[in-house]
Each structure stands twice: as structure tokens, then as C-alpha cells.
Image (cartoon, rainbow, N blue to C red):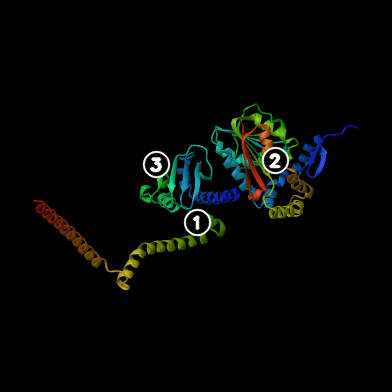
Amino acid sequence: MDPTLRAGFEAALETAVNTALKYDPGTRVRLAELSGEVLALELSAPRLNLFLCIEDEWVAVRHQWEGQVTTELRGSATAFLRLLRDTGVTPASLGVTVIGSSTFLAELQEILHDLDIDWEEPLAQLIGDVPAHTLGEALRSAGHWLRGQLQVAPGAAAEAVSEEWRLTPPKAQFDAFAEDLSELAMATERLEARVQLLREKFAHRGAE
Amino acid sequence: MKDRKTTHFGYREVPVEEKASRVAEVFHSVASRYDLMNDLMSGGVHRLWKRFTIELSGARPGQTILDIAGGTGDLTARFSRIVGAEGQVVLADINESMLKVGRDRLLDRGIAGNVVPVQADAQYLPFPDNTFDCITIAFGLRNVTDKDLALRSMLRVLKPGGRLLVLEFSKPQSKLLEKVYDQYSFRLLPTMGRLIAGDAESYRYLAESIRMHPDQEALLGMMREAGFVDCEYHNMTGGIVALHKGLKP
């Protein structure tokens, strides 16, 4: 790839990250405490190597870094995103390999989890305080509604598939079937063991 | 009558001792609008070329870096953040106007403390031997009268193991791109120079000086000849620009 394109991608990513940070002073202060630390990301899908270097309150995105790396992560892009956003998951559960300091990773996870960007501020500079606040409120309400819908969506979809459309059996029916299957499997194993025992007895008598 | 030694100034041949003053005139003329013109001429891509240069510099906190022909201080600003309070960046330029614009711009951005502006000729760098961890020269080498002398001077002031990075216009790698680039350089560029900086001649010189500059392989050979080792180059934007790297053994 032409280095110009790669540099363009890194510059765009860096600008996006630092623009977001610009509107969250709390996170910037916490990042400044980690200044000098470097997170190396080796993505398997898509294949990409990146270094996220914390410089004071900002993040520099680089393709090459010859200094010391604090923590190196290897895995897929989606796994990285989940790992950095969700403090409840472990790298191993997502198939991510961690080399170096896990403390730095935990600190980054905490910071990203608490990220609270005040999008109203740049909006207010463009359209004024009152319209920005009104628009912000509307977007927040829409966001809450969407999050609520997304939370109930998997349950509602499962119910529709089994109860309404009868594409899959209801859970109770499936559980009973699974229990029967399990008993049948155990009975089969017991029968197999008895047959084996009888075979051994007959073989022993034949030999006498 | 004794023959006078000449060198190129764009497509013209001028006496060697005149080139520096002619180049100085060009940059005095464009200094105040140099950044704006760079952005317009390259569509902002010069920032990405410089960004890649910073990456390849391998600069780290505490290092000492020399930014030759640093002009308006783009690279210096970035290096200043990387080397931190324990490091130092020397912003060097032969042209007083460019250096003044660069120094003021850095101060306006709050970049001070670890940056030292120095008016210096790349051919005769006024620093002790083995001083710098890294030297960069971005879009400056083609304006130097004696490039070999400048490369040897850079080698002298680099620490052993230190690296030189030369970012410079070069030769496009495709014939089609070369044709488009020629049209752009000799037709559009002087017009833009006239409209924005009020100086078509200076921008015509910039286009001509790019064509007269050694291509990728020639510059690589010059760096090796000067004494650099592990020399390599990276073509950028189809070879319109190339970044050469060499180490001091």
C-alpha cells in the first residue's frame, strides 16, 4: 500500500479519536496520567498493525514504533473493540492474546468505559446553546429508546420465532426433549456395557 | 577568459556562488504564504508525507533532532511533542524569513522550551560531530547548491547509528502520472502562485527545481557515496515524493 494512503488512514483515525477526546476533559486528564505508554495492536482480521501512543492528553496513531511497547494485543478488530469497551470480558474469552502489562490494558478499559463525550459543546458552537440542548435532549431520548429496544429485541425475536411462527419448538418442549434424549443416551450406554459384560462371560466359558 | 563554475537554478545555469542568494530570494518571496501554498499545491497531502517521515524517524523521548530546511516548522512541532522536555529539536533553515515565520508559528502554538531555531547552511552545519540522533530535511535538499557536501555535513553531525531522512520530490513511477504531474506543475502551479502569493516566477522555479533534482536511485547512490549505510527509499503518491533513509555507521 502507498505510504500516503496508510498515513491518511492513521491521520483520520487519530483526528477522530482526539476530536472525541477534546469534548471529554475528564478522560483527557486520566489519559495524561498514562502519558508515554504505548499500546500495540496486531489485527488479524483485517490484517493491520497499529501503535496507539499516549502523548500527554492525546493519542497518536502510528504504523511504526521503535520504542518500548507497554502492552501488545493480538486478535480480530471486533474482539479488540469489545475488549476495550466492555470491562466485564477477559481477553482470553475473546481469543485475544495479551503480551506485556495487563494493568495498562485494564486502565484503558476503565477509561473507555467511562468515556462521556459532550457532543452538545461543538453543536452549540455551530447552532447556539438552546437549539443544541434541545437537539441533544431529542437525540438522548432517541438513544435511550433505541438501547431499550435493542435490549428486548433478542428476547422478542426468539419468542416470535418459536411461539408465533412455530419455526422452532418452545423452550419447555425442547428442554423435555433434551432430557429424554439424555436419558436415552445413558440407557444405551448401560445396555452397551451389559452386552460387553455378557460377551466377556461367554468368551470366558468357551475358553474353559 | 577563465570559465566560471555553474550550477542549475531551475532550468537555468547560474554561477555556483549565485544559487544560494537566488534560492533565498524565492523563499523570502513565498515565506509568508508558504503553508497556504503547500496545502493548495498538494491538496493537503504534504501533511501525510511529513507524517510518514515522522514515523520512519523512530524519534523517541529524550532524543536530539535536527530539522534542516525546517521552514515553517511542521516537522519540528511534531518532533517537539515526541522528544519531550528531556529532548531537543533544532529548527534550522538558511533563510531568515522562513525561519522567522517558523519560529513565530511554533510560539503561537505554544511550542517552546525544547526547540532551538538556528539559521544554518546545510552544507556547513554549525554543530559538533556526533550531535544528533536523527536529521530530517523535507523539501530542502533540491535547493542546496552542493548536495554531496550537505550530505557529508549531515553525516558528520549525526551520532553513530543515527539516521538521516530526506523527504523530497522525485520521479513519478508511471508515465501517465508523470504527464499529468507535468501539466499540473508547469501550467497550474505558476498560475496558483501568481493568484495566491502574487509570484508566478518563484513557483515556476519550484517546479523546475523538482525536475532537476536527482531521482530515487540517483539520490540513493549519493547517500551511499557520502558514507551512509542501510540506505533505502519509499515512494509516496506514485513516486511524486520519495523518502530516503540512511544510517551513520
Identify the residue at horizontal 48%, vertical 49% (top origin): A24
Q: Chain of mark 3?
A: A
Looking at the rendered structure, the secondary structure element under dot 3 is helix
Do tag 3 and tag 2 residues touch (Cβ < 8 Å)? no
Q: Which residue is mark 2?
A: B218
| Residue B89 appears anywhere in the view | no
Callout 2, which amino acid? Answer: Ala
Quarter of the image that includes the N terminus of chain B: top right
Residue B104, image quadrant: top right
B47 vs A63, nearest the viewer: A63
Identify the residue at horizontal 73%, vertical 42% (top origin): B213
Residue B117, image quadrant: top right
How many circles with numbers are drawn on the protein?
3
Kindly identify which numbered label has been placed on residue A120.
1
- Observer-side mark, 3 or 2, equals 2
- Measured as percent of width and height from the top left, residue B55 is found at 57, 42
Marks 2 and 1 sit apart, C-alpha to C-alpha, by 55 Å
Q: Chain of mark 2?
A: B
Q: Which residue is mark 3?
A: A102
Q: Chain of mark 1?
A: A
Residue B54, image quadrant: top right
Residue A56 sits above or below residue A192 on the image: above
Callout 3, which amino acid? Answer: Ser
Do tag 1 and tag 3 residues touch (Cβ < 8 Å)? no
- Measured as percent of width and height from the top left, residue A7 is found at 58, 48
